Image: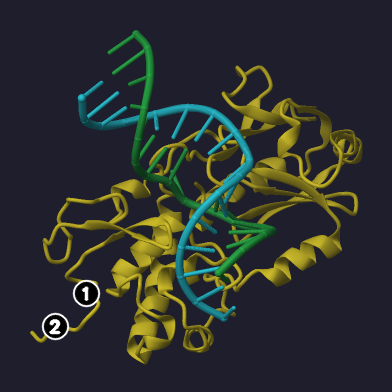
Chain colours: A yellow, B cyan, C green
Amino acid sequence: MPELPEVATIVSDLAPRLVGRQVVGIEILWPGVIGYHSTGDFQRRLVGQRIVGVRRRAKYIIVDLSGAEKLVLHLRMTGRLLLRPAETEQDRFARVVFRLDSGDELRFADARKFGRLYLWSTDEVTGLDRSLGPEPLEPEFTPALFREMVRRRASRLKPLLLDQTFLAGLGNIYVDEALYEARIHPTRRANSLSDEEIARLYCAVRSVLQTAIMDRGTTFASYVDALGRPGKHQLNVHVYRQAGEQCPRCGTPIERIVVAGRGTYVCPKCQALTIVAA
DNA sequence: CAATCAACCTGGGTGC
DNA sequence: TGCACCCAGGTTGATT
């Protein structure tokens, strides 16, 4: 479910509200979502810790603590991270609840139980960081860097852009939106792109993500921010889940195809595989 | 390195 | 209402 803009929204909601808070208790309603440590270990190591920072890397949420370890969360498809007053009725599918000294609870809820919570050392977080591709909105991600990355790869763009070790943060929605914006077909080989196409794709990736962040994410089914509010970007998507609707650019009906096992939305005219003479 | 598929789980929507 | 079936915003690991 959540991609970079959704995770960024949750982190921006949580950071000002969580920094300085202390974890005073933890309830684990479904132990399966705790990775690595035993659940007892998880509770013992976390209770009493103070939160000193909340940040994002790719689609991971990293909570920096007063101790040496860091709480790392991944929401996968249907995970939610919600900050609620403790007296609020429990959220459906709540799996782990952190009680805070403020009287609030940080609740991890996940219908499908794919999401995971880890307690990791600095070295483990560094290892995660090194295994991930660049952050598309950071200044280190330059057009020249992206050009070299894309030129070196032979795979099709759709799975390549979904690959978090290649580029961090994109998921199914924003890959389709970026490729549409750049007018490039998702099955094109990366190393077949012209310099101009790579430049278009670079700009498209960044503008799609930035626009979605301004819209506080995309809600089609289950995504909500840390206060339970849906995003607004579903009102501004051009192709994702728009099969049969008219392409905003040329009016051709949007098509749904399957690429690398993923539902994929394209304008068959704007994103034609072969150049058609005008 | 690239591609495909299964697996992890469950809910929601659709069509009969 | 019930039921079968399809779809799902992610990631990993096995296999070819």
Q: Residue at x 35, y 72 (%)?
A: A187
Q: Residue at x 71, y 67 (%)?
A: A129
Q: Are marks 1 and 2 in contact (CB under 8 Å)?
A: yes
Q: Chain of mark 2?
A: A
**Neighbourhood count class around disc 2 (C-alpha, 10 Å): few under 14, some 14–19, many 20 upward:** few
Q: What's under tag 1, amino acid-wise?
A: Ala
Query: What separation in Å lies between label 1 and label 2 (alpha carbons)?
Result: 8 Å
Q: Which residue is mark 2?
A: A276
A254 lies above or below A112:
below
Q: Chain of mark 1?
A: A
Q: Position of residue A243 (x, y in %)?
A: 23, 51
A100 lies above or below A71:
above
Q: Position of residue A253 (x, y in %)?
A: 15, 57
Q: Please tell me in which quadrant of the rendered image residue A27 appears.
A: top right
Q: Which mark is residue A272?
A: 1
Which one is nearer the viewer's eye here, A221 or B6? Answer: B6
Q: Position of residue A268 (x, y in %)?
A: 20, 67
**Neighbourhood count class around disc 1 (C-alpha, 10 Å): few under 14, some 14–19, many 20 upward:** some
Q: Is residue A122 left or right of residue A185?
A: right
